[in-house]
Amino acid sequence: MAEIEPLRALHYDLERTGGLQDVTAPPYDVIEAAQRAELEARSPYNVVHIDLPRSRDGDPYAHAARALEDWRARGIVVTDGGPAVWPLEQDYTGPDGRRRARRGFLARVRVEDYGAGRIRPHERTHPGPKEDRLRLTRATKANLSPIFSLFSDESGAVWDALAPFTEQAAWAQATDDEGTVNRLWRVADPRAIATVKEALGDAELLIADGHHRYETARVYADEVGGEGAHRYVLMCLVALEDPGLTVFPTHRLVRGLAADRHETLAAAIRRDFELEPLADSAALTTALTSSTGDEVRIGYIDSHFGRPFVLTLKDPAIADAALAGYAEPYRRLDTAVLESLILKGPLGMTDADIDDLQGLGYARDPAQALELVESGRYDAAFLMAPTPIERVRAVAAAGESMPPKSTYFFPKVPTGLLFNPLVE
């Protein structure tokens, strides 16, 4: 079982920073160079200075450690008064245009090996980001960004215990660049904390975002050894049953298709998929979101013909043969089928190519994916359907990890709300 504990957090002194608005940031792995510069300019204390550091002396990790130490010495970042859990409500408009509210809470969770009944991943990870996060953790001796994880709470006991405390003014509030309003409360009430811990006593956690950070935490805990604060990691925990929990797709783009590769790709598509031409590219998203059942349907458009299609796998047996050895829920994933039948098939990509984005790109928004093809920056786009959360759970329960970027949990949990110290 996962072990959840309140944490005595490090956090910004809101009077010194003017609240959280100018000091929070998106997770490090979605920040591009221009956005980082803009965030740095908002405040000398914006969290990107330490979570995505850069330094003129060539050691960004030492720079992050010095900055955090300086902020603590000057009272910009302070130690909270005692152990607490921190309810978080995120009011947002999703990529589908719908307004929702997602509710969870921040706490610290004991680091465990992946396994049934404890903590499970749902996507494959890359070695590069793990090394970066490990070096940052060694230098700062703190978790700077929360991992986003899911748990089952059919009775709603966890939020029922925390909800009364959210009826008062939030401890802090910040609105991100995508319009998500993040409200954070502090709950130190022993009975509420005991109820939360009891409700999660038998829970299995599923990591939604932050696999690299979690695997970094495991390595760091073993490096330090023994018991102590380093055996825990900062998490934001959201119930699978929360009505505001949504999963959106990440679309695939390919480039470098010579004329002969176009023909090979077209032949493979005709062999394994039924092709349904669409009137225009705007119909692609509708066609994918309206699909039902376990059929694998993928949107497709290329720069050569410019005509959109929906590709429907002719027979599940094709996926079964291509993905022999994988569990049945994995074989029904559109991202896994695309990876096996297209990316690694006629396009000849290896796992290393996919990990290093050699000839491959991603887009969160269908319009962005289409524009990248129409502009010629990519040769083709494969638009994916949203993966139901039940399928994410089924794949993880079967012991499988989904291909990278198979899910897009929105909104992101901001960095800078709280920090988790790894030394007593």
Image (spheres, rainbow, N blue to C red):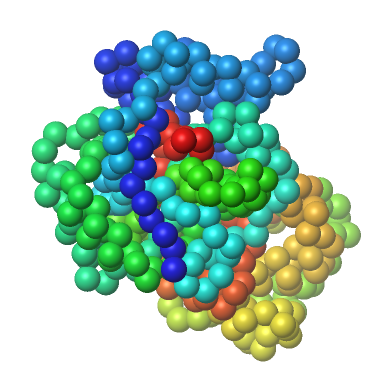
228 relative position to 23: left or right: right
Instruction: Name the image quarter holding residue 85.
Output: top left
Say whether residue 147 is visible. no
Front-most of residues 119 and 268: 119
Q: Is residue 339 left or right of residue 310?
A: right
User: Is residue 221 placed above or below 176 in the rendered structure?
Assistant: below
In front of the other: 82 or 245: 82
Q: Quadrant of the N terminus?
A: bottom left
| Residue drawn at the location 58% of the way across and 22% of the way down | 65
> From the viewer's perspective, is residue 176 above or below residue 62?
below
* Residue 29 visible somewhere in the drawing: yes
The picture places residue 342, in percent across and down from the top left corner, at: 74, 67
**In the figure, is residue 142 to the left or right of 381?**
left
User: Exactly how many numbered labels are in the figure?
Assistant: 0
From the viewer's side, name the closer residue of 251 and 159. 159
Q: Position of residue 267 (x, y in %)?
A: 79, 72
Task: Give percent across and percent down for residue 28.
Answer: 55, 35
Residue under the image location 33 percent in, 64 percent down = 200
Residue drawn at (27%, 15%) of the image: 15
> Which of 318/380 is in front?
318
Q: Residue at x 53, y 65 (%)?
A: 120
Quarter where residue 413 is shown: top left
